Amino acid sequence: MGIYFEKIMDLRKKGKTYKEICKELNCSMSTVSYHCRKEKMGGHTDRLNDEQKKELQELYDKIGNLKKVAKIMGHAFETVQKYVIKKEPRKKILTNSESVILWRKRVKLKLIEYKGGKCCFCNYNKCVGALHFHHVNPNEKDFNIGGTNLSFEKLKKEVDKCVLVCSNCHSEIHEGLIKL
């Protein structure tokens, strides 16, 4: 069977990994793999005892990187991947422009809700992007609602000078087909 067979089988039954066996017996990975496969002792990712699994999980919880855990613990990446329960993925860090876009969308939703949530002429309410704030008296207009980063309270004061309309009705207002 070979000079390593019994020693490899004994160490494998004790839960040692291929790498640990190679190091202890000063033999190659292929020798360990050959004997383990021949005796159906599982691949190198199959034999971790509960204490080793716990150590893997604790180290992963501490550093949060599977590759680093594998390197530190001397296991294959696949072994660590198999036994470690990953944390929730980290939330994506937004760029400034992405944060501004999200803030504007939230504010627009609040303003639409404040103005009744639908077109004041046809009751359309399906698409937020199709709802506009139309100034009733253009002479009282201080600024456009969209594209500004003013506080909600300042925007609310400006929206009080407007009616909420869908894009179709807004176009018809400007064409003179709908009178305010």
Image (spheres, grey):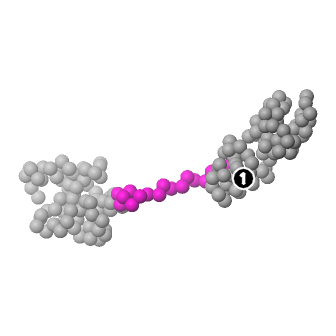
Would residue 56 be seen by someone viewing this image from the given angle? no
Quadrant location, the C terminus:
bottom left
Question: What residue is shown with label 1?
Answer: 72
Badge 1 amino acid: Ile
Q: Is residue 113 above or below residue 32?
A: below
Residue at image position (24%, 53%) is 131
- Residue 102 drawn at (x, y percent): 37, 58
Q: Which residues are magenta?
A: 84-101
Q: Residue at x 91, y 28 (%)?
A: 1
Q: Nearer the viewer, residue 22 or 109?
A: 22
Query: Circle 1 — which element?
Result: helix
Is residue 72 rendered to the left or right of residue 144?
Answer: right
Left or right of 173: which side holds 59? right
The overriding secondary structure of the stretch rendered in magenta is loop
Point 81% across, 37% down: residue? 28
Residue 109 locus on image (x, y percent)? 32, 58
Residue at point 67%, 54% (across, down): 60
Query: Pointer 1: residues within 10 angstroms few (<14), some, or many (20+)?
Result: few
Left or right: 106, with 163 as reference point: right
Say if the magenta span includes residue 92.
Answer: yes
| Image location of residue 69, percent across then percent down | 69, 52
Residue 5 on the magenta span: no
Q: With 147 as the anchor, is 175 left or right in this view?
A: left
| Foreground of the two, 95 or 175 | 95
* Count of numbered tags: 1
Report whether residue 19 is seen. yes
